[in-house]
Amino acid sequence: MKKAICFTFIAALIAGCATTKSSSRPGVSNDRIQEQVILVESVNSTLDLNALNRMDTADAYKTANSYYKNGDYVNAITAYDFTCAKFQYIPACVRLASMFEKGQGITANRLIALDIYERSCYGGHDESCNDAKRLRK
């Protein structure tokens, strides 16, 4: 019973993190996060989002990785963002955070990277916890 309650709580926490665009951290305004969300949505991507929407998690992630490996960071960040948001697939979220941190395919933004790393950390990805701690310094 305790495991079921704990699992339900964690699932609700993750779902809440994925659906909200607000931040309770000092220094990170909701406007800044919303600005970056709009920026990802408005990059000049040639990616067919309808085709991506018909894919399962594995295929969407493979598509994003393919763009990334070929150096097409604009389409890669769009595909990682889509895969992270739609499937809440932590590896896609982690790569998305890394791209925000490094400015690959989008303007570098450490605050957005930190937010994504923290959400991935809450999802159980230990390396993201370390990345979030590193960015907080």
Image (cartoon, helix red, strand yellow):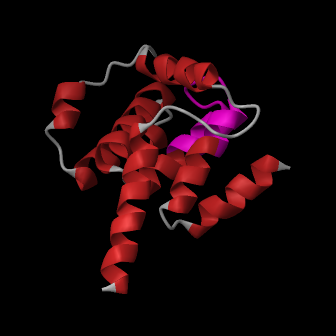
Q: Is residue 13 visible?
A: yes
16 above or below 125? above
In the rendered picture of this protein, how many numbered marks are placed on residues? Answer: 0
Residue 111: say if magenta.
yes
Q: Residue furthest right?
A: 137
**Residue 78 locus on image (x, y percent):** 40, 30
- Which residue is more in the foreground, 3 or 48? 3
**Residue 90 locus on image (x, y percent):** 44, 56
Q: Residue furthest bottom?
A: 1
Q: Is residue 83 left or right of residue 100?
A: left
Q: Look at the image and give the residue range highlighted in magenta.
A: 96-114
**Residue 40 locus on image (x, y percent):** 47, 23
Taking the spot 52% from the left edge, 56% from the top edge, the residue there is 120
Taking the spot 44% from the left edge, 14% from the top edge, the residue there is 42
- Which residue is more in the foreground, 113 or 58? 113
Residue 47 falls in image quadrant: top left
| Image quarter in which the N terminus is found | bottom left
**Residue 108 locus on image (x, y percent):** 68, 28
Taking the spot 40% from the left edge, 75% from the top edge, the residue there is 6
Taking the spot 13% from the left edge, 38% from the top edge, the residue there is 54
- Which residue is more in the foreground, 72 or 89? 89
70 above or below 127? above
27 above or below 87? above
Q: Is residue 29 left or right of residue 137?
A: left
Q: Residue furthest left?
A: 54
